[in-house]
C-alpha cells in the first residue's frame, strides 16, 4: 500500500543564501533513488513536506519548475525548529521530502489568457516555478501577455535576482520589480506593490491575476484589482495554515469545510469569499 | 438475508466460532470503566452501557509509531525513513455500539478521503469485522436519534446483535458479516418483526428528538459569524476532553523522538481546543481565543462534516462529551442554539 507519510530520501546538492539578512536559503535536492523523482511529478503551485529526521517536517512551496529536471528547489525562511535546523545543514546532508501535496495553479484552464503575476517578499517561490514553466518554449505560446510585479522592502531581500533580471531582458514577459524606498544604484521601480500594480496591471478582460505575498500586501492589492475590474474568480491566491499531515487528515489546516493542504492551497477569491477567514 | 439466533447458553460457543483464527475484541471492565480490549469468549458480557473512551483507539491509537529513521547514512543500506509496517491482525469486535460504529465510519471517510489513504488506519479498520450490539434500553445520555441515527442503526457494522426473547439475535449487514454468521453454524430465525418493534420502542425511549435540521439550511458564513459563539464558549476550559473521548474526532500531531542513532516518527492525538493546534511559526494564530476554537469544534461536527459527507453529521449522539465535560457544555443545547440563532445577520 502506498504510504503518503513516507518521505523520499534526498541529498542536499546545493545551498544558496538568497537574502542579505541570510534568513532565506534555497535548497537544491537530488533524489537518492532516481525513480522517486518520477513519483514526485508536480506542477507549479504545489508544495511538499521537508522532513528532517529527529526534527520534524515543514510544508514548503516548490520553487522549481517541473521543466527543471534532475533536482527540486525550495526556499526556506528561518522561523522555528525545523527551518532553523535546516539553515545549519550542509551540502551532501541527507534528509527527506514528501509530496507533491496540494493543488497547483489552474494553469490548464488559464490557457489563452493574459496573466498578471504579483509577488511580495519571499512568497514569490511558487510563482518562480510558474514563470519558469510558462516561459518554456512549449508552454509560452499557449498564454497571452505575462506581467510580473514583484516587491520587497529592500534590494537585498529580493530572491532569485539572476532570474528576474534575465526575465526583464526578454520581450515575452513584462517585469516590474520594486522596493519600498529609494536606494543608490537601484535601476528598477520604487514604491509599494499595490501602487505599482495599479499603474501596470493589464485590462481585466481575459486576464487572471496570481497573487502571493504577506497578508498586508494582499489586503491592499486586492482592492486595486477589484477597482481595475478584476472579478473574484479571476483573482487566484495561495493560502498558508499550520500543517502536519498535508493530506486532509490531521485536521489542523481547515478553513471552514476545506483543508488548505488537500483542497488548496490555491483558491480563487470567489472561493475564499464563501469561506470563514480563518487563515 | 436471514437473521440468526444464539441461545442464552450458546454465546460462548458462538464467540469461539467467530474468533477462530482471529483476535476477539470486546468491552471489558477496567476499574469502574470499560474499554474494548483483547479478550476470550468466557469473559465477554452484554452487561455494559458503553465504553469510557470511544473505540477509535482500535484503529487510531493515542500514540502510534509511523516510521523509524537512522542518522548514519554511511551504512550499507541507508534509509532515511522506514515504514514501521502494518501490524494489523485480523480480528472481530463484539459489542461495539451503533453510535460508535457510525462515528468511526465518518472518520473512515477522512482517513480514506478523495485524495489520500492513510495506510495505518486502513490496515486496522479493514481487518476488523464489526459486530455491533443494539441498545434495547438507551442510556440517559444518549441522543443518537436526534443526530439522525438509531439505537438499532447498522451504519459501519458487519453484523447487528440484539437481545431477543429467545437469546441473542443476529442480523447480517454486509457480505462479510453474512459469511461470518454462515460459517458459525447458527440456527436461522425470522426475527424481523421483533427487531422492528424493539427498534421502535428504543427510539421512543429517547423522547421526542430535537430538530437540528435548521443548521443544514443556514448558510456557512451566517452560522460562523453568529454573535452567540462567544457566550457558548464562555465557560469552556479548552481542556480537550470532549475531543479525546469522541468517536469522530480524528485530529493528530506528528512528532519525532530520537536518540544518537536514530528514532521514530509518531503521531499523537491532538485537539482543536489547543492554542498550539493552529499557531503559525510567525506567531500569527487564525484561532487565537477559545471562542474560535469552540466554534471550530461545533462547526466541524455539525456543519463542515455534513457539507462534506452528504449530510451525515460528525456527532452521532454517544453522549460522552455531555457526561465528561467539566463545565457541562452540552452539544445538544449548542446544536439547538445553532438551529435557532438570530437570522437577521445574513452573510
Ligand atoms: C502551503 C505552504 C507553503 C509554504 N511555503 C513556504 C516557503 O516556500 N518558504 C518558507 O520559508 N515557508 C513556507 N511556508 C511556511 C513554513 O511552513 C513555516 O515557516 C514553517 O512550518 C515553520 O516551521 P519551523 O519548524 O521552522 O517553525 P516551528 O518551530 O514549527 O514554529 C512553529 C512552532 O513554534 C511555535 N511558535 C511559533 N511562534 C510562536 C510564538 N509567537 N509563540 C509561541 N510559540 C510559537 C509554534 O507553536 C510551533 O510549535 C509555507 C507554509 C505552507 C502552509
Ligand atoms: S472537533 Fe476539533 S479535534 Fe475534533 S475532529 Fe474537529 S477539528 Fe479535530
Ligand atoms: S470538555 Fe468542555 S471544557 Fe473541555 S474543551 Fe470540551 S467543551 Fe471545553
Ligand atoms: S495538514 Fe493535516 S489536514 Fe491539512
Image (cartoon, rainbow, N blue to C red):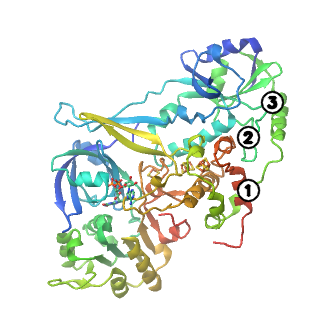
Instruction: Name the chain letter of the residue that bears numbered label 1.
Output: B
Q: Can you give x and y, in whole percent of width and height, for residue B35 in the image? A: 60, 28
Disc with the residue nearer the chain's start (3 vs 1): 3
- Judge whether A183 appears above or below B128 on screen: below
Q: Nearer the viewer, residue B145 or B6?
A: B145
Q: Quadrant of the N terminus of chain B?
A: top right
Q: Residues within 10 Å of mark 2 (few under 14, many from 20)?
A: some
User: Of circles 3 and 1, which is in front?
Assistant: 1
Instruction: Name the chain letter of the residue that bears numbered label 2.
Output: B
Q: Quadrant of residue B336?
A: bottom right
Name the secondary structure under disc 3.
helix
Report if the CB atoms under discs 3 and 2 are less than 8 Å apart.
no
| Residue designated by label 1 | B336
Task: Measure how far apart labels 3 and 2 are at the Cα level.
Answer: 23 Å
Q: Which mark is residue B57?
A: none
Left or right: A147 as drawn, with respect to B327: left
Q: Residue at x 51, y 71 (%)?
A: A270
| Residue designated by label 2 | B141
Instruction: Name the chain letter of the residue that bears numbered label 3.
Output: B
Q: Quadrant of residue B83?
A: top left
Q: Residue at x 25, y 45 (%)?
A: A95
Q: Quadrant of the C terminus of chain B?
A: bottom right
- The answer to whether residue A147 of the structure is visible from this angle is yes
Q: Residue at x 41, y 51 (%)?
A: A246
Q: Residue at x 39, y 30 (%)?
A: B85
Task: Measure how far apart labels 3 and 1 are at the Cα level.
Answer: 31 Å
Q: Nearer the viewer, residue B63 or A12?
A: B63
Report if the CB atoms under discs 3 and 1 are less than 8 Å apart.
no
Disc with the residue nearer the chain's start (3 vs 2): 2
| Whether marks 1 and 2 lie on the same chain | yes
Amino acid at each position: 500500500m502506498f504510504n503518503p507519510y513516507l518521505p523520499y530520501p534526498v541529498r542536499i546538492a546545493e545551498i544558496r543564501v538568497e537574502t542579505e539578512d541570510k534568513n532565506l536559503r534555497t535548497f537544491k535536492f537530488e533524489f537518492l533513488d532516481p525513480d522517486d523523482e518520477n513519483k514526485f511529478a508536480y506542477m507549479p503551485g504545489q508544495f511538499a513536506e521537508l522532513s528532517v529526521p529527529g526534527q520534524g517536517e515543514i510544508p514548503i512551496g516548490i520553487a522549481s519548475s517541473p521543466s527543471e529536471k534532475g533536482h527540486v528547489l525550495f526556499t526556506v525562511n528561518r522561523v522555528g525548529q525545523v527551518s532553523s535546523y535546516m539553515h545549519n545543514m550542509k551540502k551532501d546532508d541527507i534528509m527527506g521530502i514528501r509530496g507533491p501535496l496540494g493543488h497547483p495553479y489552474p494553469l490548464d484552464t488559464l490557457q489563452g489568457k493574459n496573466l498578471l503575476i504579483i509577488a511580495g517578499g519571499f512568497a514569490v517561490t511558487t510563482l518562480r516555478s510558474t514563470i519558469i514553466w510558462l516561459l518554456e518554449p512549449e508552454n509560452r505560446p499557449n498564454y497571452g501577455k505575462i506581467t510580473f510585479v514583484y516587491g520587497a522592502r529592500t534590494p537585498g531581500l529580493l530572491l532569485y535576482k539572476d532570474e528576474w533580471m534575465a526575465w526583464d531582458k526578454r520581450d515575452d514577459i513584462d517585469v516590474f520589480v520594486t522596493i519600498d524606498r529609494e536606494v543608490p544604484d537601484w535601476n528598477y521601480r520604487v514604491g509599494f506593490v499595490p501602487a505599482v500594480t495599479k499603474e501596470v496591471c493589464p485590462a481585466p478582460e481575459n486576464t487572471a491575476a496570481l497573487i502571493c505575498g504577506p497578508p498586508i500586501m494582499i489586503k491592499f492589492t486586492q482592492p486595486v484589482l477589484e477597482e481595475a475590474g478584476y472579478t473574484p474568480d479571476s483573482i487566484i491566491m495561495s493560502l498558508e495554515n499550520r500543517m502536519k499531515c498535508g493530506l486532509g487528515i490531521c485536521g489542523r489546516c481547515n478553513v471552514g469545510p476545506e483543508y488548505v493542504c488537500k483542497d488548496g492551497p490555491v483558491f480563487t477569491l470567489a472561493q475564499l469569499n464563501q469561506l470563514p477567514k480563518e487563515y | 438475508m436471514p437473521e440468526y439466533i444464539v441461545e442464552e447458553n450458546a454465546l460462548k460457543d458462538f464467540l469461539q466460532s467467530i474468533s477462530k483464527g482471529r483476535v476477539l475484541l470486546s468491552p471489558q471492565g477496567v476499574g469502574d470503566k470499560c474499554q474494548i480490549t483483547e479478550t476470550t469468549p468466557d469473559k465477554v458480557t452484554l452487561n455494559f452501557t458503553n465504553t469510557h473512551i470511544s473505540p477509535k483507539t482500535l484503529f487510531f491509537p493515542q500514540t502510534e509509531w509511523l516510521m523509524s529513521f537512522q542518522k548514519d547514512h554511511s551504512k550499507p543500506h541507508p534509509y532515511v525513513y522506514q515504514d514501521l509496517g502494518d501490524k494489523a491482525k485480523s480480528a472481530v469486535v463484539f459489542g461495539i455500539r451503533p453510535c460508535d460504529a457510525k462515528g468511526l465510519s465518518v472518520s473512515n471517510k477522512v482517513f480514506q478521503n478523495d485524495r489520500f489513504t492513510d495506510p495505518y488506519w486502513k490496515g486496522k479498520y479493514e481487518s476488523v469485522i464489526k459486530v455491533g450490539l443494539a441498545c434495547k434500553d438507551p442510556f440517559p445520555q444518549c441522543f443518537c436519534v436526534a443526530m439522525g441515527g438509531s439505537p438499532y442503526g447498522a451504519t459501519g457494522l458487519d453484523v447487528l446483535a440484539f437481545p431477543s426473547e429467545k437469546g441473542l439475535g443476529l442480523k447480517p449487514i454486509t457480505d462479510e458479516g453474512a459469511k461470518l454468521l454462515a460459517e458459525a453454524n447458527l440456527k436461522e430465525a425470522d426475527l424481523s418483526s421483533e427487531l422492528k418493534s424493539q427498534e421502535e420502542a428504543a427510539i421512543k425511549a429517547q423522547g421526542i428528538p430535537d430538530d437540528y435540521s435548521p443548521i443544514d439550511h443556514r448558510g456557512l458564513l451566517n452560522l460562523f459569524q453568529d454573535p452567540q459563539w462567544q457566550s457558548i464558549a464562555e465557560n469552556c476550559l479548552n481542556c480537550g476532553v470532549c475531543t479525546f473521548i469522541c468517536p469522530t474526532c480524528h485530529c493528530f500531531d506528528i512528532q519525532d523522538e530520537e536518540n544518537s542513532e536514530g528514532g521514530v516518527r509518531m503521531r499523537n492525538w491532538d485537539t482543536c481546543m489547543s492554542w498550539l493546534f493552529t499557531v503559525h511559526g510567525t506567531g500569527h494564530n487564525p484561532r487565537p481565543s477559545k471562542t474560535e476554537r469552540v466554534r471550530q469544534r461545533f462547526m466541524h461536527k455539525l456543519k463542515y462534516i455534513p457539507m462534506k459527507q452528504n449530510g451525515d453529521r460528525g456527532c452521532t449522539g454517544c453522549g460522552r462529551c455531555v457526561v465528561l465535560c467539566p463545565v457541562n457544555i452540552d452539544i445538544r443545547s449548542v446544536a439547538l442554539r445553532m438551529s435557532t440563532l438570530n437570522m437577521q445577520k445574513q452573510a
